[in-house]
Amino acid sequence: MEREKTDVLIIGAGPAGIISAAFLHTNGIKVKVVEKSQFPRFTIGESLIPRVMDNFEEAGLLEVLKNVGFQKKHGARFIKDEKVAEFDFSKKFGKGWDWTWQVPRADFDFILAEAAQRNGVEILFKTTVKEVAFHGKKSLTKIQGKNDDLSEIEADFIIDSSGYGRVLAEKLNLEAPPQIASHSSVFTHVNEINRPAGKEGEQITFEILDTQVWFWYIPFSNGNTSLGFVAPKKWFDKFSNDQKIAFQEMLQLTEYYHGRFDDTDFLFEPVKVENISKNVTRLYGDGFVLTGNSAEFLDPVFSSGVAFATESGLLAAKLILREFKGENIDWQKEYADYMKKGVAVFHTYVKEWYSGNLQKIMFHSAPNEKIKEKICAVLAGYVWNQENPFVKKHERILQNLAKLIEMEGSGN
C-alpha cells in the first residue's frame, strides 16, 4: 500500500480546513487536505457574519472572495407578527467589520478551495478517511480515493475540519450530548424571478412563526434565494410526507412572505436535517485538533457556524505553527478555553432566543439604542470582546433585561 508523509493532514476542505491549510502552507508547513466530496457541492451555512472577514483577511483569502460579487450583508432583519427588528452592523458596539456576505456555499467553498490549490495546497477530493491510528502525536491515516484505491498518510498533526462528517469525533468516540435542545431544519433554493428591488430583495430576514419556530430568507447575488425552516423535530410531523408538498404547507404559515413563492419551483427537493446541534467531549488531543462543525454546532439562528469554523481553523493553524517551531503550547488554555468562551456567548443567545427572552428584547416597542448596539456586536460575531457587557455578562444580562421588560409591561 502506498504511503506518504506530510506535516499536517487536514480532513475537510470547507472554510475551516481551507483557512488552516492556507495559513500553514504560507508559513512553510507541508499540508495535505482530504475531502470526501467533489467540489462544488451543496452545504448549508449560507449567511456569514462580519467576524469571518478578519479571519479570511489574516489567512490571505479575502481579496479573492471580494472579486466574486457575492451579495453583501450589512445586517439582519427579524420579523414577528407585525413587529420588525433590524440590526445594522455599522451601528454595532466596538470595532470590527460592518459587512460580510450571503453566499451559495457550493460556489463559495469551491472558490476558496481553488484559491488554496493555486497557491500550492494539495487537496484530494472524493477521498474518504477509513482508519486513523495515533502513535504518540504522530498518526497514520488510511484513506480511500476516488478510484477506490487505498493509501496511507503519515502526519505529525491532524486537523479535523470534516464538519458534519465528524470523522475524529466518531472514530475516537468523542461525541457528546449537545449543549442546547436540538432543533431540525428543512430548506431549499428558488430562482426568485420577481424578487423586489433594493434592500427588500437583498437583506437576510428571519420570520418568527412561534417562539420555537422560524423561517429564513437569504437572497444571493446570482438571483437564487435560500428558504428554510427551523423548529423542534416534532413540529415537522404535522406536514405531508412529501417534502415538496410539506415545504409549501409550511410556507403558507408565514405572514410576511405568505404567497410570495406560490408559483416558484424549487431548485432541488427540500432537504431535511434532523438534530442540528452537535457537541464533543474535548476539542484536542495528542496530535489532533477539532475545528468548526466537526467540534460543535449550536443552531443556525444567528449564522455563527462559518464564524466559529474560520476562527477555530485559523487559531488551530497558528498554534500548530508555533508548536512546530518548538514552543510548548497549552492547548487547553490557548485553544479550548478561548473557543469555549465564544461558544458560551452564542450558546446563551441561542438559549435565550428559544426561551423567548431575547425575542422580548429585540421586539421591544421602544428599544434602547445603546443596548441594541451591544447586541448587534454579538450578532456580528465579536463574542470575545470583554469590553462589551453583553459579552462579559452574557449569562445573566439577557434574563435580567427581559425581566425588566416584563415588569414594564405589567406596570410594576
Image: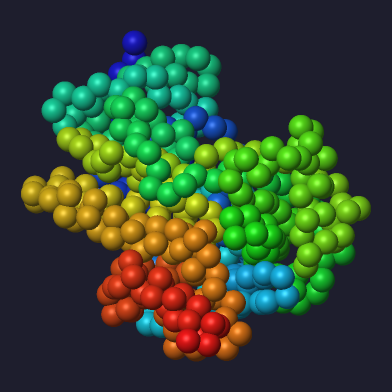
Find residue 235 and report its image quarter.
top right
The count of marks equals 0
Q: Is residue 288 left or right of residue 84?
A: left
Residue located 73% across and 75% down the image? 82
User: Vertically, is 330 above or below 76?
Assistant: above
- Scheme by which the image is coloured: rainbow
Q: Is residue 27 visible?
A: no
Q: Nearer the viewer, residue 181 or 261?
A: 181
Q: Is residue 241 visible?
A: yes
Q: Is residue 121 above or below residue 199?
A: above
Q: Nearer the viewer, residue 141 or 308?
A: 308
Q: Position of residue 407 (x, y in %)?
A: 48, 82
Q: In terms of image quadrants, where is residue 175?
A: top left
Report x, y in % for residue 353. Answer: 51, 63
Vertically, is 168 above or below 41? above
Of residue 190 and residue 370, the one placed in the foreground of this image is 370
What is the quadrant of the N terminus in the image?
top left
Left or right of residue 305: residue 319: left
Residue at the (47%, 37%) spot, across then down: 164
Compared with 30, 391 (above or below) is: below
Q: Position of residue 20 (x, y in %)?
A: 35, 49
Name the residue furthest right: 263
Residue 55 falls left or right of residue 212? left
Q: Where does residue 358 sit, x and y in percent of width and height?
A: 50, 69
- Farthest top residue in view: 1
* Left or right of 386 in this view: 96: right
324 or 307: which is nearer to us? 307
Q: Quadrant of residue 67?
A: bottom right
- What residue is shown at x 24% (from left), y 51% (from top)? 336
